[in-house]
Image (cartoon, coloured by chain):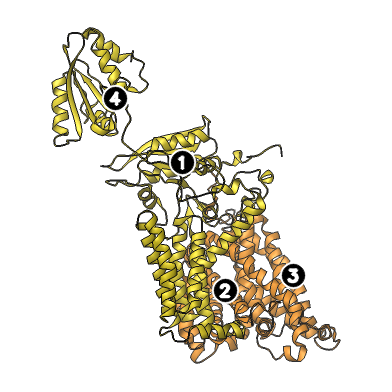
Amino acid sequence: MRMFADNQRISHRQMSRQMILSLIVPILLCLPGTHHILGANGLIGILTNFVIYYFVIILLIRIAPAYQNLPKTIALLYLIPLVFTGAYLLATTARLVCTYLISGVPQWLAGLLILTVCATGSHMGMEKRGRIGEVSCSLVVGGFLLLYLLACFQGDSVYVNNPVQGAFRWTDSLDSSYTIFCALSYLGFLPFLLSRVSKPNSSRKPVFAGVLILGAMLGIALLLSQAVFGWERLIREKFPILPLMAGTNLPGDILARFDVLWIALLIYGLFFSLGSIFFYGSHILEHAGLQPLRLWMLLLVYIIAVNSFYGYQIEEWFGWLLSWVVTPLITALTLYMCLWYKSKSKGGVPEK
Amino acid sequence: MDTCETPVSASLRVNEDYIRQKLNHCDDIVIRPMRLGEGKKVDCLVVYIEVAVTNMMLEDSVIGKLINHFWEIPPSQMKEFLKYNSLGISDVTEIPTMEAALKAMLAGNAIFFMDGFDQAIKIASKGYPNMGVTQADREKVLRGSKEGFSDSVKTNSALIRKRVKDTRLKIVESYSGVRSDTLMHLLYVEDLAPEELLEEIKNRLSSFEIDGVMDSGVIQQLSEETWYSPFPQFQTTERPDRAAMELLNGRIVLICDNSPIALILPTTFHNFMQVSEDRYQHFELVSFLRCLRYLAMLTATLLPGLYLAVTRFHTQVLPTNLLLSFAEARQGVPFSSVVELVFLELSFELIREAGVRIPGALGNAIGIVGGLIIGQAAVEANLVSPIVVMIVALTALGSLAIPSEEFSAPFRLLKYLFIFLSGFLGIFGILLGVYGVISHLAGLKSFQIPYLMPFVGKELDRKQGDGVLRWPLRYMNERPIFANQDQRVRLKGR
């Protein structure tokens, strides 16, 4: 029998869907507004990153075997971006829930419930994660495509065709490219995933297809939100996807408003992203033989997120953190692993 | 022979003493000494359970014929006669030990001992009384066979053999239950069922020791990998045609004596949404009905929760007129909508349970009385609002439309979880629940097969065409993922 379910490996399809689902909602939610990925510069940023990540993916696939024997220090360094990103996503999700879905519930409680649900079972193997991704991806991506389709009817081409607003500028394009590069820098965790993928050496196509889908979804969101809101309003919105959702209804007056359902879709996607953070955290700790630290990692994520509800808001400084700490750290660690793998390979016995 | 077993003695007295000692105070068992042979010189003994063996004096019974014949032949020929089964009796077996002889007797056979002969003779008879082949009550179909399994494992195996007349259909006997010694049949098609799966099942069946197995449900619960999950990891059927079909899909069927329910394994979420007549009907209708069943599953689980979420937290979703009519309907109801809904849901569960337990036509009457009169009275007494009655009725219809009773049970339970989650947290609660349930289902496996097949691993199941939408039969060329890789082709020439 093909004991395919028991080989602790996932297929290319599951890998690609998992990757898309982990990144799609944070990218669509956060990039267009807070990080000013807008207009032609945003689109150029997306195209530039297609080129950059084509090569980055090749590199990541090549050095994936090195991640089988990760030194403990490197493992702990990899945890830093995960903890901060987890805290940011948890805080953002809890805040969205308390703002749009249920008022009256304290954010710390909403955060605790989200943490509990997303962290439960997050250490139970790559196959399970792959299956959740495979089942949920079509729902979430399909939901967003429906949103885009319905939002088309609200747009005005005048807003998009305006030659001045959102026009190309070198500096803005570079800025957008770097921000999108930062958002996709979590692909630096791909080698951890590849060790559990069947035929990892031929993973380039599905991974790159995932990047293309993410880029395309972001590009459409940029165009649509500009077409619907116009430039002046767009640059003032923190999360432009939210008002886009609020104004999009199904034709036929089936329900008075649809925004709750769109927000539910968004929150579900965020749950998966958070689950991925906890999963990779557990996975890295397990690799480094530090499983008991898993609970501490969750606690740390929760403390940082709760702190942001009552004091120093992580949402305010996460953009800076992503650009100047998280992405450089992931890049540096990737380069280090690259050199380490090369030296090990030269030594004659590549680590497996 | 096991060293601690007692061999059958050539002395009838020794054997009789042993039997009488073991069967002391077993008044249902007949120990009948007799003298047979020409001149009635040979001491013999027949041991049997009174109701399990045909009256031996009847001319047409096997044992009756044997004894009648023994009155006519000389004692010297009796041994030879037994040894070579000269009467041509179909099921006569020599048994070398007393333990095996008693086991055969307890299985419903007559055991014959003869002085000077160091073997016991098992003579099969009608066996224990049972209901025989009846109509399948739980899995009703409009098209297809009406036969259902009976309580006898051998009858059930024969019903399957009747449908799969192939020497590659193998039936392996085993016993479970230290005291009940329940006979089980493991059925599989040799070249279709994977070897590793068979080994795994045999290992699981031998991994526990229990005093008694009264139904296949005991085996099911003790063999499930994720025992704490409310979702069944074995499929059950009381239809021989369904069991035969699944054998041809490469799955394995386990039948247990005294149980009209066969276990089918491995199983997936989607298998529970299929019924046997799905194969016999046109693909358009089957696809539509399957979509309807999935909708029923969602209704049974989420409808009450969604109602609470929308009416308590997200009223902006509803058109104003509908919202006003909801509010109007609830006027005068003293309880919160959560209490109202839980009260009515529990009332329905009570009616359902009472309807199942009360015998015959009275059970149906209770359903009508409960559904119509109590519901109407509750609305008139302002205990519940009419809209909640409608929600509960739709939920009940949804749970009844799920083809498998044991599969609808987890959704009935989850419904309460969603009622509480959405009652206190609205859509956010439902999201938490849905994520938790999907996460749980994604981790479930039934004998190494992911529970969520074919929604996961689609690339492995591409040509089967038996998902939520069913392809036309002529394009369903391949067997499902359960079958051996080299035996996947099911249909050729269309």
Compared with residue B286, is residue A45 higher up or lower down, i.e. above or below?
A: below
Image location (x, y in percent) of residue B437:
49, 66
Viewer can see residue A288? no
Dot 4: within a 10 Å radius of its alpha carbon, few (fewer than 14), some, or many (20 or more) residues?
Answer: many
Chain coloured orange in the rendered structure: A
Image location (x, y in percent) of residue A4:
55, 50
Disc 2/disc 4 C-alpha distance (Å): 66 Å
Image location (x, y in percent) of residue B278:
59, 49
Disc 2/disc 1 C-alpha distance (Å): 40 Å
Residue A351: image quadrant is bottom right
Disc 4/disc 1 C-alpha distance (Å): 31 Å
Marks 2 and 3: which is nearer the front? 2
Furthest-right residue in this view: A163
Could you tell which of marks 2 and 3 lies nearer the N-terminus?
Answer: 3
Question: Foreground: B270 or B128?
Answer: B128
Disc 1/disc 3 C-alpha distance (Å): 49 Å
According to the picture, the residue beneath numbered tag 1 turns out to be B198
According to the picture, the residue beneath numbered tag 4 turns out to be B122
Q: Which mark is residue A268?
A: 2
Chain coloured yellow in the rendered structure: B
According to the picture, the residue beneath numbered tag 3 turns out to be A50
Compared with residue B446, is residue A155 higher up or lower down, i.e. above or below?
A: below
Say yes or no: labels 2 and 4 on the same chain: no
Image location (x, y in percent) of residue B119:
25, 20
Q: Which amino acid does label 2 sit on?
A: Tyr
Q: Which amino acid does label 3 sit on?
A: Phe
Disc 2/disc 3 C-alpha distance (Å): 27 Å
